[in-house]
Amino acid sequence: MPVLVVLIIFTFAFYLYYKIKSYRSNKPIEKRWISAKSSIALGLFVAFFGINQLFLYRSTLSFVIGAVFLLIGFASAWAGFRAYKHYLPQVLDELRH
């Protein structure tokens, strides 16, 4: 499915962008906040890859691998989102001072 391929490429590009941005940041809380955004992007990348795997091949092994990638990807994206929400007020506080 071409839509999934485009989503996979975009999420991987966002992962690289946020990872480089977090590496270049000098503020510690901002670094963790941007790292949480990269975790969301990486989780979505893995999840979209798992969804693509489910549609690409029709074997039992492919289904199991796709389901595992899907679960791990969405769990990682959810954890990244929770970290993003946790660090957001701290980043805003850090930027004011």
Image (cartoon, rainbow, N blue to C red):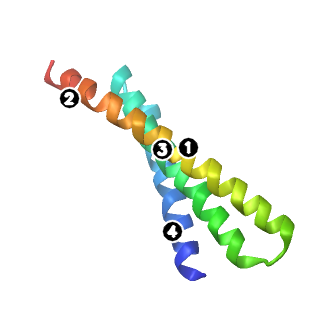
Are the two marked residues, 4 and 3, in contact with CB atoms closer than 8 angstroms?
A: no
> What residue is shown at x 56% (from left), y 73% (from top)?
4
Q: Is residue 73 above or below residue 85?
A: below
Q: Which residue is mark 3?
A: 78
Q: Residues within 10 Å of mark 3 (few under 14, many from 20)?
A: some
Instruction: Name the residue type under label 4.
Output: Leu
The secondary element bearing badge 2 is classed as helix
Q: Which residue is mark 4?
A: 7
Q: Is residue 83 above or below residue 90?
A: below
Instruction: Name the residue type under label 3.
Output: Trp
- What x and y, as percent, mark residue 43? 55, 49
Q: Residues within 10 Å of mark 4 (few under 14, many from 20)?
A: some
Query: First in sequence: mark 4 or mark 3?
Result: 4
Query: First in sequence: mark 4 or mark 2?
Result: 4
- What x and y, as percent, mark residue 33? 37, 33
Are the two marked residues, 1 and 4, in contact with CB atoms closer than 8 angstroms?
A: no
Q: Quadrant of the C terminus?
A: top left
Q: Is 9 displayed left or right of 33 in the figure?
A: right
Instruction: Name the residue type under label 1.
Output: Ser
Q: Nearer the viewer, residue 27 or 83?
A: 83
Q: Is 58 displayed left or right of 19 in the figure?
A: right
Instruction: Name the residue type under label 2.
Output: Leu
Are the two marked residues, 4 and 2, in contact with CB atoms closer than 8 angstroms?
A: no
> What residue is shown at x 65% (from left), y 71% (from top)?
52
As drawn, the residue found furthest toward the top would be 97
Q: Which residue is mark 2?
A: 92
Q: Is residue 63 above or below residue 73?
A: below
Are the two marked residues, 2 and 3, in contact with CB atoms closer than 8 angstroms?
A: no
Q: Is residue 1 visible?
A: yes
- Which mark identifies residue 76? 1
Is label 1 or label 4 in front? 1
